Amino acid sequence: MNATHLVLKYCGVRVDADALTDAVRVDATRPTVASQLLDAVRALANTEAHIAQLVPTIGRALRDVEQVLAAGPDDQIPVIDTTGVLQARGPRLDALLARRAAQIEHLRAATRLWVAQHPDPATTTSAPQ
C-alpha cells in the first residue's frame, strides 16, 4: 500500500501515486505542490507510526492500573511501574496527537491545491461517499 492512502483517508480524494511521484520528479530543484503534498503524506505517516509504537505500552500500563483498582483484598495485583509509565508517556502521546492534527490540516491544504492543479480524473478522483 502506498502512502497516498492517507490522502484518501483524511481528505476523501484518491491521488494516483505514480502521477504524484512523476510531478515531483519534473522539478526537483524547488518546492512544488506535488513535493509539498508528498512531504505532508510522509510526515503524517511517520507520526502515525510513532503513535502506533507508543499505544501498546500505554495500553499495558492502563490495564495494570485497572487490575490494581479492581483487585480485592486477597487478589494478586501487578506491580505498577514506579517510574510512572502513563505520566512519562502521556505528554509524548499528547504531543504526537497534536502534531498529527496539524499535519492532517497541512495535508488537506496541499490536497486542495493538488486537486485544483490536477482536475484530470486519471490523477485525482473524489472517493465515493
Image (cartoon, grey):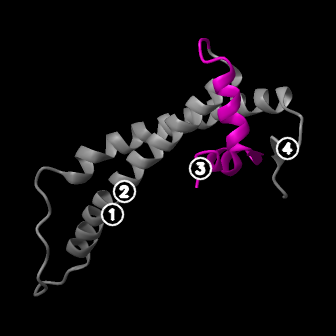
Q: Name the secondary structure under disc 1.
A: helix
Return the residue at label 3: 2
Q: Which mark is residue 122?
A: 4
Q: Give 84 or 59, whichever is nearer the viewer.
A: 59
The residues tagged by marks 1 and 3 sit, at their Cα atoms, a distance apart of 28 Å
Return the residue at label 2: 55
Vertical comparison of 12 with 119: above or below: below
Q: Amino acid at mark 2?
A: Val
Count residues near mark 1 (Cα–Cα under 10 Å), then give few for <14, some for 14-19, many for 20+: few
- Whole-percent x, y for residue 104 in the image: 61, 37
Q: Residue at x 81, y 42 (%)?
A: 124
Q: Residue at x 82, y 33 (%)?
A: 115
The part of the chain drawn in magenta is 1-30
Return the residue at label 1: 59
**Residue mark closest to the camera, 2 vs 3:** 3
Q: Are marks 1 and 4 in contact (CB under 8 Å)?
A: no
Query: Left or right: 128 with respect to 89?
Result: right
Magenta-span inclusion, residue 46 = no
Q: Which mark sits nearer the N-terminus, 1 or 3?
A: 3
Vertical comparison of 127 with 100: above or below: below
Count residues near mark 4 (Cα–Cα under 10 Å), then give few for <14, some for 14-19, many for 20+: few
Q: Are marks 2 and 1 in contact (CB under 8 Å)?
A: yes
The residues tagged by marks 2 and 4 sit, at their Cα atoms, a distance apart of 38 Å
Q: Name the secondary structure under disc 4.
A: loop
Q: Amino acid at mark 4?
A: Ala
Q: Give 62 or 92, whichever is nearer the viewer.
A: 92
Residue 60: quadrant of the picture: bottom left
| Residue found at the very far bottom of the displayed protein | 74
Q: Residue at x 62, y 47 (%)?
A: 6
Count residues near mark 2 (Cα–Cα under 10 Å), then give few for <14, some for 14-19, many for 20+: some
